[in-house]
Image (cartoon, rainbow, N blue to C red):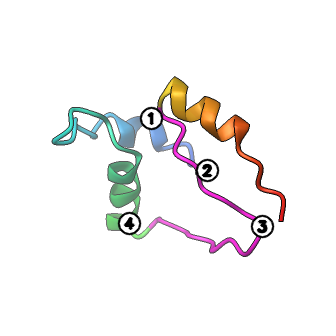
Amino acid sequence: MYFHDERVADLASRVTPSARGELETTTLNEIYLALDALHVEKMGLGFAWLDTGTFESLKDAGDLDLRI
C-alpha cells in the first residue's frame, strides 16, 4: 500500500519505462528514497501484498481467501 505526498505527480513524471516497458512504482519509491523522503512501515501478520496490475491478477486477488 502506498501513500504519496503532493509531489507525487511531479516526481512520477520523471519515471521512464523499465526494461519490460512498464512504469514501475518501485522507481517512484527509489526517487523518494534518493530524496530521503521515503517512510516505510513494516506490516505484521494478517497482511498480504498482492500485485494486481492486470485484470487477471486483480480477479485472483479478489478470489483469494486470506483467513487464518
Total marks shown come to: 4
Q: Residue 18 appears at what percent x and percent y?
A: 21, 41
Q: Work out how far the residue at label 2 is from the one at label 1, CA to CA, in angstroms.
A: 12 Å
User: Mark 1 touching mark 3, by CB under 8 A?
Assistant: no
Q: Which residues are magenta?
A: 37-53
Q: Compare residues 7 and 19 and report the one nearer the observer.
A: 19
Q: Give residue 33's mark.
A: 4
The amino acid type found where label 1 is placed reads: Ala
User: Mark 4 touching mark 1, by CB under 8 A?
Assistant: no
Residue 51: in magenta span: yes
* Mark 3 Cα-neighbour bin, 10 Å: few <14, some 14–19, many ≥20: few
The amino acid type found where label 4 is placed reads: Leu
Q: Residue at x 83, y 58 (%)?
A: 67
Q: Residue at x 37, y 38 (%)?
A: 12
Q: Work out how far the residue at label 4 is from the one at label 1, CA to CA, in angstroms.
A: 16 Å
Which is in the foreground here, disc 2 or disc 1?
2
Which is in the foreground here, disc 1 or disc 3?
3
* Mark 4 Cα-neighbour bin, 10 Å: few <14, some 14–19, many ≥20: few
The amino acid type found where label 3 is placed reads: Gly
Tell me which label, 4 or 1, sits earlier in the chain: 1
* Mark 2 Cα-neighbour bin, 10 Å: few <14, some 14–19, many ≥20: few
User: Mark 2 touching mark 1, by CB under 8 A?
Assistant: no
Location of mark 2 (residue): 3
Callout 4: helix, strand or loop? helix
User: Mark 3 touching mark 4, by CB under 8 A?
Assistant: no
Tell me which label, 3 or 4, sits earlier in the chain: 4
Q: Work out how far the residue at label 2 is from the one at label 4, CA to CA, in angstroms.
A: 14 Å
Q: Give residue 9's mark.
A: 1
